Image (tube, grey):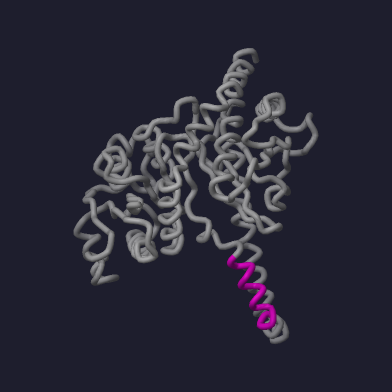
Amino acid sequence: MANARIALDAFGGDSCPGPQIEGALQAVRTGGVDVVLVGDEQKLKTALDAQARDWASLPIRIHHAPDVITMQDSPSKAVRGKPGASMPQCFELVKTGEADAVVSAGNSGAMLACGLFKYRRIKGVDRPALVTSTPTRNGKLTAFLDVGANVDCKPVNLVQFAVLGAVYAGFKHGRTRPNVGLLSNGSEDGKGTELTRVAHQLLREHPSDAFEYTGYAEGSDLMAGAVDVMVADGFTGNIALKVMEATGRAIGGWLKDAIIGSTRSKMGALLMKPALMELRSALDPDVYGAAPLLGVRGLAFICHGSASANAIAHSLEFAARSVSEKLAPQLEAAVAEHKPLFDAAKTAESAS
């Protein structure tokens, strides 16, 4: 089988194109992926020559894109106004059959706009969602969505996220009939907002063979691994994710300060080093790769703006696996199978 061809936005990210080039070299040397570096051709050739003289013999090619979408650009205006920028050019390569998927650490809003304008939505999906994998205390990963694509949601969006998230949990985390929870401020039926209460009722009244809806889940359940899929609107999900990330950094800083505070603590840390390194590995976001945009008719993966070379490499490898194992057709099939649930959600919306 031919390697998957991944279009990498080489000028999307905080420190581009260094991590993008290093990550691409790492991924192609691991095997299973061909990379199309998209960006200013001369700058990319100069950077590649500096990092690897043998790059021309590797499955890497350059697609010239003279413009860049910055983090400050308005997403929709930039996508329309900068068609020659590296990010929209990545999507064009997929549309023309020259690549199979897109990876970028650039403007996430622009990635969403590109997904909507270039790929379009899967038939039956009202809004796509961003999903990420969160580590938990029991060692498994939870698929958490939406983490930022949709600030304002309707019940139909949440039930669609449940379906998309269940497919992703099965694909990425190996879950068979994953259990799905709806993020709320309590587990009782009367908790939540009008949005979550309607979605909660819809998911209870329309059971699925593809996943088990277990009801409301609280914020503490996310890190506990109580559910395989956690569903939220993009506003709530993005805040929850950023609080989790900030808490992890804060604890790491406090732990470091405590360790260097005395000779005794330094000696204790030396004894605990294997356990601390294991914990660091378990919480390392680089391992989990990019956040896929689920619900569009194509594969697009969004990395953090400060993604390291390792994170870029893992994202390219996961994108290649998603191509070879046909994640996109699995999502489309699941959406079609759950049309009765989505129709019920729209009927409930009309009646309210």
The quadrant holding residue 122 is top left
Q: In this view, does 70 lie to the left or right of 185?
A: left
Q: Which residue is drawn at 65% across and 30% down?
A: 208
Indicate whether residue 102 is drawn in magenta. no
Q: Position of residue 217 (x, y in %)?
A: 72, 41
Q: Main secondary structure of the magenta part?
A: helix
The quadrant holding residue 190 is top right
Residue 22 sits above or below residue 126 on the image: below
Of residues 108 and 309, the one nearer the viewer is 309
Indicate whether residue 276 is drawn in magenta. yes
Of residues 199 and 240, the one nearer the viewer is 199
Residue furthest out toward the front: 1
Q: Residue at x 26, y 52 (%)?
A: 39
Q: Is residue 71 left or right of residue 216?
A: left
Residue 9 visible, this angle? no
Of residues 235 and 4, the one nearer the viewer is 4
Query: What is the magenta range?
Result: 269-281
Q: Is residue 285 left or right of residue 328?
A: right
Q: Residue at x 49, y 25 (%)?
A: 124
Residue furthest out toward the top: 351
The quadrant holding residue 183 is top right
Q: Where is residue 162 in the image (x, y as percent from the top left)?
A: 60, 35
Residue 78 visible, this angle? yes
